[in-house]
Image: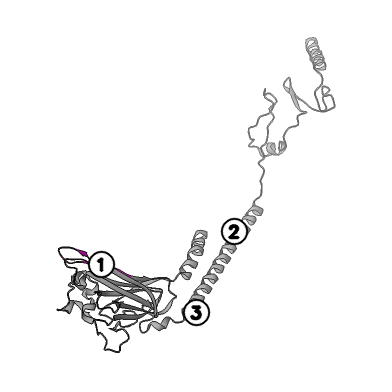
Amino acid sequence: MLQILLISLLIAPQVLSNPAFTNISIDDSSLDPLTGARITYGYLNQVTANGSGWHVGQNCSTCLARPDPSQVFGGTWHDTSTVVVGNRIPFASVSFTGVAIYVMGIVVSSAPESTTSLNNSRIFFQVDGADEASFMFNASLGSEVIYSYNTTLFAKEDLSDGLHNVTMMCGSGDPSTDSVCLLDRFIYTTSTNPQANASSPALNSNATVSTGVIVGAAMGSSLFLILLVALYFLRRRHSREQDTLAQTVVPFMKSYVIHPNNDSEHSTEPSNDVNTRRANAELPRYSDIILAGHIILASDPLYDGGGGISPPRRQRARMKEERGVRRGE
Protein backbone atom coordinates (compact mmCIF):
# COMPACT_ATOMS: atom_id res chain seq x y z
CA MET A 1 0.00 0.00 0.00
CA LEU A 2 2.80 2.41 0.94
CA GLN A 3 4.68 1.70 -2.29
CA ILE A 4 1.57 2.47 -4.35
CA LEU A 5 1.10 5.79 -2.57
CA LEU A 6 4.73 6.81 -3.07
CA ILE A 7 4.68 5.91 -6.77
CA SER A 8 1.47 7.88 -7.25
CA LEU A 9 3.04 10.83 -5.43
CA LEU A 10 5.99 10.85 -7.81
CA ILE A 11 4.07 10.30 -11.04
CA ALA A 12 0.87 12.30 -10.58
CA PRO A 13 2.43 15.81 -10.58
CA GLN A 14 4.43 15.01 -13.73
CA VAL A 15 1.40 13.71 -15.58
CA LEU A 16 -0.74 16.67 -14.63
CA SER A 17 1.91 19.38 -15.15
CA ASN A 18 3.25 18.10 -18.49
CA PRO A 19 0.48 18.05 -21.10
CA ALA A 20 1.01 15.67 -24.00
CA PHE A 21 2.22 17.25 -27.25
CA THR A 22 1.50 15.94 -30.71
CA ASN A 23 2.64 16.76 -34.23
CA ILE A 24 0.02 17.64 -36.83
CA SER A 25 0.83 17.46 -40.55
CA ILE A 26 -0.91 19.71 -43.06
CA ASP A 27 -0.44 18.28 -46.51
CA ASP A 28 0.17 20.76 -49.33
CA SER A 29 -3.15 19.81 -50.94
CA SER A 30 -5.28 19.09 -47.87
CA LEU A 31 -6.87 20.84 -44.92
CA ASP A 32 -5.51 20.83 -41.38
CA PRO A 33 -6.90 17.55 -39.98
CA LEU A 34 -7.22 19.14 -36.54
CA THR A 35 -8.72 22.57 -37.23
CA GLY A 36 -9.70 22.48 -40.90
CA ALA A 37 -7.33 25.39 -41.74
CA ARG A 38 -6.27 25.69 -45.39
CA ILE A 39 -2.91 26.64 -46.88
CA THR A 40 -3.07 29.90 -48.82
CA TYR A 41 -1.07 30.18 -52.09
CA GLY A 42 -0.48 33.38 -54.05
CA TYR A 43 1.87 36.23 -54.88
CA LEU A 44 3.35 38.41 -52.19
CA ASN A 45 1.81 41.91 -52.00
CA GLN A 46 -0.72 41.11 -54.72
CA VAL A 47 -4.39 40.32 -54.61
CA THR A 48 -4.76 37.13 -56.64
CA ALA A 49 -6.84 34.03 -56.64
CA ASN A 50 -5.77 31.32 -54.26
CA GLY A 51 -3.18 29.09 -55.92
CA SER A 52 -1.70 31.74 -58.21
CA GLY A 53 2.00 31.22 -58.94
CA TRP A 54 1.96 27.55 -57.88
CA HIS A 55 1.30 24.24 -59.62
CA VAL A 56 0.07 20.98 -58.20
CA GLY A 57 3.29 19.12 -58.83
CA GLN A 58 2.04 15.60 -59.53
CA ASN A 59 -0.43 17.01 -62.10
CA CYS A 60 1.94 19.54 -63.76
CA SER A 61 3.04 18.54 -67.25
CA THR A 62 5.18 21.65 -67.85
CA CYS A 63 7.13 21.57 -64.58
CA LEU A 64 10.79 20.58 -64.79
CA ALA A 65 10.82 18.89 -61.40
CA ARG A 66 9.51 15.30 -61.49
CA PRO A 67 9.77 13.75 -58.03
CA ASP A 68 8.52 10.25 -57.30
CA PRO A 69 4.99 10.56 -55.82
CA SER A 70 5.50 7.39 -53.77
CA GLN A 71 8.31 9.14 -51.86
CA VAL A 72 6.24 12.24 -51.04
CA PHE A 73 3.88 12.71 -48.06
CA GLY A 74 0.36 12.06 -49.30
CA GLY A 75 1.69 11.61 -52.84
CA THR A 76 1.31 15.37 -53.57
CA TRP A 77 3.46 18.52 -53.64
CA HIS A 78 3.29 22.14 -54.84
CA ASP A 79 5.79 23.48 -57.36
CA THR A 80 6.86 27.02 -58.20
CA SER A 81 9.89 28.54 -59.96
CA THR A 82 11.26 32.04 -60.63
CA VAL A 83 11.64 31.04 -64.27
CA VAL A 84 7.84 31.04 -64.47
CA VAL A 85 6.88 33.90 -62.14
CA GLY A 86 9.61 36.42 -63.05
CA ASN A 87 9.96 39.23 -60.49
CA ARG A 88 6.95 38.19 -58.47
CA ILE A 89 7.38 36.28 -55.26
CA PRO A 90 5.13 33.24 -54.76
CA PHE A 91 4.22 32.45 -51.15
CA ALA A 92 2.48 29.71 -49.17
CA SER A 93 1.04 30.58 -45.76
CA VAL A 94 -0.92 28.80 -43.02
CA SER A 95 -2.08 29.52 -39.47
CA PHE A 96 -1.76 27.05 -36.60
CA THR A 97 -2.00 26.82 -32.82
CA GLY A 98 1.06 25.31 -31.23
CA VAL A 99 4.58 25.71 -29.90
CA ALA A 100 6.69 24.73 -32.95
CA ILE A 101 6.51 24.75 -36.76
CA TYR A 102 8.38 22.82 -39.44
CA VAL A 103 8.26 23.27 -43.23
CA MET A 104 9.05 20.12 -45.20
CA GLY A 105 9.89 20.01 -48.89
CA ILE A 106 11.74 18.33 -51.73
CA VAL A 107 15.20 19.40 -52.82
CA VAL A 108 17.03 18.70 -56.07
CA SER A 109 20.34 17.47 -54.73
CA SER A 110 21.92 16.71 -58.12
CA ALA A 111 21.18 17.75 -61.73
CA PRO A 112 23.03 17.36 -65.06
CA GLU A 113 22.73 21.02 -66.09
CA SER A 114 23.58 24.28 -64.35
CA THR A 115 21.47 26.66 -66.43
CA THR A 116 18.00 25.71 -65.23
CA SER A 117 16.07 26.52 -62.08
CA LEU A 118 16.45 22.95 -60.86
CA ASN A 119 19.95 23.73 -59.62
CA ASN A 120 19.08 26.39 -57.06
CA SER A 121 16.67 26.89 -54.19
CA ARG A 122 16.20 30.32 -52.58
CA ILE A 123 13.47 30.20 -49.94
CA PHE A 124 12.65 32.73 -47.19
CA PHE A 125 10.44 32.34 -44.12
CA GLN A 126 8.43 34.56 -41.82
CA VAL A 127 6.65 33.75 -38.54
CA ASP A 128 3.88 36.11 -37.43
CA GLY A 129 5.04 38.66 -40.03
CA ALA A 130 8.68 38.77 -38.88
CA ASP A 131 11.59 37.50 -40.99
CA GLU A 132 13.06 34.40 -39.43
CA ALA A 133 15.36 32.45 -41.75
CA SER A 134 16.21 31.42 -45.30
CA PHE A 135 17.07 28.18 -47.08
CA MET A 136 19.77 28.37 -49.76
CA PHE A 137 20.83 25.32 -51.68
CA ASN A 138 22.79 24.65 -54.86
CA ALA A 139 22.47 21.28 -56.54
CA SER A 140 25.60 19.41 -57.50
CA LEU A 141 26.30 18.43 -61.11
CA GLY A 142 25.55 14.86 -62.03
CA SER A 143 24.43 12.59 -64.81
CA GLU A 144 20.80 12.52 -63.60
CA VAL A 145 18.36 14.43 -61.44
CA ILE A 146 18.37 13.20 -57.84
CA TYR A 147 15.82 14.37 -55.30
CA SER A 148 16.05 14.53 -51.52
CA TYR A 149 12.67 13.89 -49.94
CA ASN A 150 11.24 14.95 -46.58
CA THR A 151 13.83 17.72 -46.25
CA THR A 152 13.41 20.24 -43.42
CA LEU A 153 13.44 23.63 -45.13
CA PHE A 154 12.62 25.58 -41.96
CA ALA A 155 12.10 24.94 -38.24
CA LYS A 156 10.99 27.26 -35.46
CA GLU A 157 10.62 25.97 -31.91
CA ASP A 158 9.99 27.43 -28.45
CA LEU A 159 6.99 29.42 -29.63
CA SER A 160 4.41 30.57 -27.11
CA ASP A 161 1.48 28.19 -26.97
CA GLY A 162 -1.03 30.09 -29.06
CA LEU A 163 -2.11 31.09 -32.54
CA HIS A 164 0.69 31.69 -35.08
CA ASN A 165 1.24 32.10 -38.81
CA VAL A 166 4.08 30.87 -40.98
CA THR A 167 4.82 32.08 -44.53
CA MET A 168 7.14 30.52 -47.10
CA MET A 169 8.39 32.74 -49.99
CA CYS A 170 10.13 31.44 -53.07
CA GLY A 171 12.90 33.60 -54.52
CA SER A 172 13.95 37.15 -53.71
CA GLY A 173 12.10 38.81 -56.56
CA ASP A 174 15.22 38.93 -58.73
CA PRO A 175 14.40 37.07 -61.98
CA SER A 176 18.09 36.72 -62.77
CA THR A 177 18.51 34.29 -59.90
CA ASP A 178 16.86 30.97 -60.59
CA SER A 179 15.03 29.23 -57.76
CA VAL A 180 12.81 26.18 -57.56
CA CYS A 181 10.58 25.54 -54.53
CA LEU A 182 8.85 22.21 -53.90
CA LEU A 183 6.54 22.25 -50.87
CA ASP A 184 5.47 18.94 -49.35
CA ARG A 185 3.76 19.78 -46.02
CA PHE A 186 3.70 21.85 -42.83
CA ILE A 187 4.14 20.18 -39.43
CA TYR A 188 3.29 21.94 -36.19
CA THR A 189 3.51 20.79 -32.57
CA THR A 190 0.49 21.42 -30.41
CA SER A 191 -0.84 20.51 -26.97
CA THR A 192 -4.44 20.83 -28.06
CA ASN A 193 -6.66 17.77 -27.78
CA PRO A 194 -7.47 16.86 -31.40
CA GLN A 195 -10.93 15.50 -30.50
CA ALA A 196 -11.90 18.45 -28.32
CA ASN A 197 -10.85 21.17 -30.77
CA ALA A 198 -11.64 20.26 -34.36
CA SER A 199 -13.18 23.47 -35.63
CA SER A 200 -10.79 26.39 -35.15
CA PRO A 201 -7.17 26.96 -34.07
CA ALA A 202 -8.39 29.83 -31.88
CA LEU A 203 -10.09 27.41 -29.49
CA ASN A 204 -6.85 27.18 -27.51
CA SER A 205 -6.64 30.93 -26.89
CA ASN A 206 -7.17 30.41 -23.15
CA ALA A 207 -4.06 28.24 -22.81
CA THR A 208 -2.86 30.33 -19.85
CA VAL A 209 -5.99 29.51 -17.86
CA SER A 210 -5.64 25.83 -18.67
CA THR A 211 -2.04 25.85 -17.45
CA GLY A 212 -3.10 27.42 -14.16
CA VAL A 213 -5.78 24.82 -13.68
CA ILE A 214 -3.30 22.05 -14.39
CA VAL A 215 -0.75 23.41 -11.90
CA GLY A 216 -3.46 23.80 -9.23
CA ALA A 217 -4.65 20.25 -9.77
CA ALA A 218 -1.08 18.96 -9.52
CA MET A 219 -0.47 20.76 -6.21
CA GLY A 220 -3.78 19.59 -4.78
CA SER A 221 -3.13 15.97 -5.68
CA SER A 222 0.38 16.15 -4.21
CA LEU A 223 -0.90 17.51 -0.87
CA PHE A 224 -3.62 14.86 -0.75
CA LEU A 225 -1.15 12.04 -1.33
CA ILE A 226 1.24 13.46 1.31
CA LEU A 227 -1.66 13.49 3.79
CA LEU A 228 -2.47 9.86 3.01
CA VAL A 229 1.15 8.82 3.58
CA ALA A 230 1.27 10.72 6.91
CA LEU A 231 -1.95 9.07 8.12
CA TYR A 232 -0.57 5.66 7.12
CA PHE A 233 2.57 6.12 9.23
CA LEU A 234 0.62 7.49 12.23
CA ARG A 235 -1.77 4.55 12.20
CA ARG A 236 1.09 2.09 11.86
CA ARG A 237 2.91 3.68 14.81
CA HIS A 238 -0.25 3.57 16.95
CA SER A 239 -0.73 -0.12 16.16
CA ARG A 240 2.84 -0.90 17.24
CA GLU A 241 2.35 0.91 20.56
CA GLN A 242 -0.85 -1.01 21.24
CA ASP A 243 0.89 -4.31 20.45
CA THR A 244 3.72 -3.44 22.88
CA LEU A 245 1.30 -2.65 25.72
CA ALA A 246 -0.68 -5.82 25.10
CA GLN A 247 2.36 -8.05 25.48
CA THR A 248 2.77 -9.66 28.99
CA VAL A 249 5.66 -11.72 30.31
CA VAL A 250 4.57 -15.06 31.79
CA PRO A 251 7.40 -16.53 33.91
CA PHE A 252 8.12 -20.19 33.57
CA MET A 253 8.30 -21.88 36.94
CA LYS A 254 10.16 -25.17 37.21
CA SER A 255 9.69 -27.20 40.37
CA TYR A 256 12.58 -28.97 42.01
CA VAL A 257 12.37 -32.32 43.82
CA ILE A 258 14.87 -33.12 46.55
CA HIS A 259 16.08 -36.74 46.57
CA PRO A 260 17.78 -37.45 49.88
CA ASN A 261 19.49 -40.58 48.62
CA ASN A 262 20.75 -39.01 45.42
CA ASP A 263 24.36 -37.93 45.12
CA SER A 264 23.46 -34.78 43.22
CA GLU A 265 22.35 -31.68 45.03
CA HIS A 266 19.05 -31.20 43.30
CA SER A 267 17.08 -32.89 40.57
CA THR A 268 15.91 -30.47 37.94
CA GLU A 269 13.39 -32.87 36.53
CA PRO A 270 9.87 -31.43 36.70
CA SER A 271 7.57 -33.16 39.16
CA ASN A 272 4.21 -34.42 38.04
CA ASP A 273 2.81 -34.32 41.55
CA VAL A 274 0.78 -31.19 42.24
CA ASN A 275 1.60 -31.09 45.96
CA THR A 276 5.28 -31.62 45.28
CA ARG A 277 5.35 -28.77 42.74
CA ARG A 278 3.67 -26.46 45.23
CA ALA A 279 6.08 -27.47 48.01
CA ASN A 280 9.05 -26.80 45.79
CA ALA A 281 7.77 -23.71 43.97
CA GLU A 282 10.78 -21.77 45.23
CA LEU A 283 14.34 -22.66 44.48
CA PRO A 284 16.11 -24.32 47.51
CA ARG A 285 18.27 -22.03 49.57
CA TYR A 286 21.96 -22.39 49.35
CA SER A 287 22.06 -22.78 53.15
CA ASP A 288 20.57 -26.26 52.66
CA ILE A 289 23.48 -28.60 52.00
CA ILE A 290 23.45 -32.32 51.41
CA LEU A 291 26.04 -34.02 53.58
CA ALA A 292 26.45 -37.72 54.31
CA GLY A 293 23.12 -38.57 52.78
CA HIS A 294 20.97 -36.13 54.76
CA ILE A 295 20.07 -32.46 54.62
CA ILE A 296 21.75 -29.99 56.96
CA LEU A 297 19.22 -27.31 57.80
CA ALA A 298 19.64 -24.05 59.65
CA SER A 299 18.71 -25.85 62.93
CA ASP A 300 21.55 -28.34 62.59
CA PRO A 301 24.52 -27.97 64.99
CA LEU A 302 26.89 -27.94 62.00
CA TYR A 303 25.29 -24.78 60.74
CA ASP A 304 27.39 -21.86 61.83
CA GLY A 305 24.41 -19.50 62.14
CA GLY A 306 25.72 -17.01 59.58
CA GLY A 307 24.29 -18.49 56.48
CA GLY A 308 27.55 -20.38 55.78
CA ILE A 309 29.05 -23.82 56.46
CA SER A 310 30.86 -24.85 59.64
CA PRO A 311 34.61 -25.01 59.29
CA PRO A 312 35.95 -28.31 58.02
CA ARG A 313 37.55 -29.07 61.46
CA ARG A 314 34.20 -28.99 63.22
CA GLN A 315 32.74 -31.18 60.55
CA ARG A 316 35.51 -33.74 60.95
CA ALA A 317 35.04 -33.72 64.77
CA ARG A 318 31.35 -34.35 64.42
CA MET A 319 31.99 -37.21 62.01
CA LYS A 320 34.50 -38.83 64.42
CA GLU A 321 32.00 -38.54 67.26
CA GLU A 322 29.32 -40.25 65.17
CA ARG A 323 31.70 -43.10 64.26
CA GLY A 324 32.53 -43.61 67.97
CA VAL A 325 28.89 -43.85 68.89
CA ARG A 326 28.30 -46.44 66.22
CA ARG A 327 31.21 -48.59 67.45
CA GLY A 328 29.85 -48.48 70.97
CA GLU A 329 26.53 -49.71 69.79
Q: Main secondary structure of the magenta part?
A: strand
Q: Nearer the viewer, mark 3 or mark 2?
A: 3
- Tags 1 and 2 in contact by the CB under 8 Å rule? no
Disc 3 is placed on an element classified as helix
Q: Quadrant of residue 231?
A: bottom right
- Tags 3 and 2 in contact by the CB under 8 Å rule? no
Residue 268 appears left or right of 19:
right
In the rendered image, residue 329, in percent from the top left (x then y), is placed at 79, 12
Foreground residue, 82 or 308? 82
Residue located 43% across and 74% down the image? 159
- Magenta residues (range): 138-153
Residue 81 visible in the shown view? no
In the rendered image, residue 118, in percent from the top left (x then y), is placed at 20, 71
Which label sits on residue 236? 2
Q: Earlier in the sequence, mark 1 or mark 3?
A: 1
Which label sits on residue 138? 1
Image height check: is 11 above or below 81?
A: above
Residue 167 appears left or right of 239:
left
The question of residue 229 being in magenta is answered with no
| CA separation in Å, label 3 and label 2 | 41 Å
Amino acid found under the numbered disc labelled 1: Asn
Which label sits on residue 209? 3
Q: Quadrant of residue 317?
A: top right
Image height check: is 281 above or below 58?
A: above
Residue located 50% across and 67% down the image? 13
Foreground residue, 27 or 282? 27
